[in-house]
Image: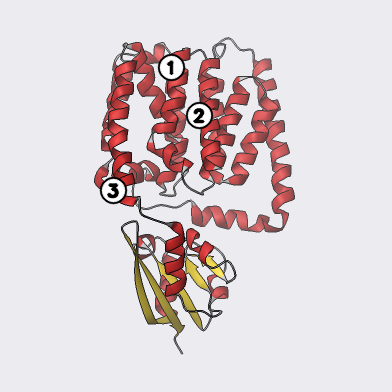
Amino acid sequence: ISLICTVFSAVCWSCLLLKNGLSRRLSILFGLSLLLVEPYFGAANQARPDALSFLLVSAAALAFSFHRNLVAGLLSAVAIEIHPVGISAILFIAALFLSEQDAATRTWRAAVRTILWLSAGLLAGLIYYYLLHAQHLSLIATTIQHGNVGGNEVNHILFEYFFKTKYFRHIPELVAIVAAAAMFLLKRHYRDTRLVPALFVVCILFTLIIRRPNFMYTIYVYPAFLLLILWLSEKYNFLRVATVLLLLYLIPQYGLVYVKNRNWSMDRYIASIQKAVPEGTAPVLGRPNDWFAFLDRRFYTTDFRGDLEGILAQEIVLIEDDLYRSGHYPELKTLIEKSYRPTGTVELNSLGETITVQILNLID
């Protein structure tokens, strides 16, 4: 499903760029490149909501490009319902609105009409949201408050992507993006296109609004970076060389990932987790994927945002990963260290990461 969503997202973006006056060659190459770069290649191969949310964000932006403003507003609201980062749809629409060819000559009546239709779509989406979540509306503010937080970095999403991934493998991309942005400004290419700088600005704004340090959210930012580089490459007749360089940069990385992980099996991992955890009724706290090993048992993810005190039991099972050990879930970690003592430990290895299964008993 994630793969299908990612492919259709790329199609949406190719159509969007073509509709907004970019060349057919650049629009098609942008869609193909979108499928190859890591943020989207990764999203296509994971069971996460990002791919579906990004598809709706892309479809909302495309609908707006074709002046289907009611549909654009509705799709934006549905994207936000799937994941709060779907707010990027509204930012993309704002960029398109400001960069349209008639933006400078648009009458205020036309602008108001556009905003009203968008608002009507968003209102319909809010009704849809209410019908789905009426009984949980009180939790929205708490979820956002606890979920939209980060560390001390100025820009959490980009910091995670460029500086906290293995081997600093995204540094070459950062160099290319910074160089392209500098060249774009120095050569004053903002006089040649409004779409490229508008998308770039709203995507940076998105990374400042969303404070949670999750590099997976880069998929909502990367269209601006990729478009900037490809637009400049076409401007200077460098598009073919840029494509070759992109392939030379990505293929060795994906080849190495395949070689290192080709023997990994989800079935084997589930079997090893089930073997490490004693049978019984003790609730299990672990990573989202660990849920598949405990379908018939009380299971909570380590980022559980409900009543932590309410899930306490005389005995619990904790599946630790690097995120837990590094303090990403401070409330849970503090509660467990204060209230429980370990009575058994098993260590496993998953994709080079040490997974520790701890049997914990409540301190009398």
Q: Residue at x 69, y 16 (%)?
A: 109
Furthest residue in direction front, as rendered: 263
Secondary structure beneath dot 1 equals: helix
C-alpha separation, residue under disc 2 versus residue under disc 3? 26 Å
Foreground pick, 184 / 166: 166
Q: Is residue 143 above or below residue 56?
A: below
For the point 67% across and 57% down, the residue is 136
Quadrant showing the N terminus: top right
Amino acid carrying mark 1 in the image: Leu
- What residue does disc 2 label? 10
Asked whether the residues under the numbered discs 2 and 3 touch, taking CB atoms below 8 Å apart as contact, a structural biologist would say no
Labels 2 and 3: the sequence-earlier one: 2
Q: Position of residue 256 (x, y in %)?
A: 28, 43
Secondary structure of the residue carrying tag 2 is helix
Q: Is residue 358 left or right of residue 100?
A: left
Residue located at (35% from left, 50% from top): 262
Q: Position of residue 225 (x, y in %)?
A: 38, 28
Query: Image height check: is 345 above or below 255?
Result: below
Label placed on residue 149: none
Residue 170 visible in this rendered orientation of the protein: no
Task: Decide which of 77, 56 is in the foreground and name it.
Answer: 56
SS label for mark 3: helix
Which residue is identified by label 3? 166
- Disc 2 residue type (three-letter): Ala
Q: Please name the residue shown 61% across and 54% down the image.
A: 140
For marks 1 and 3 on the same chain, the one whose residue lies earlier in the sequence: 1
Q: Earlier in the sequence, mark 2 or mark 1?
A: 2
Residue that label 1 marks: 26
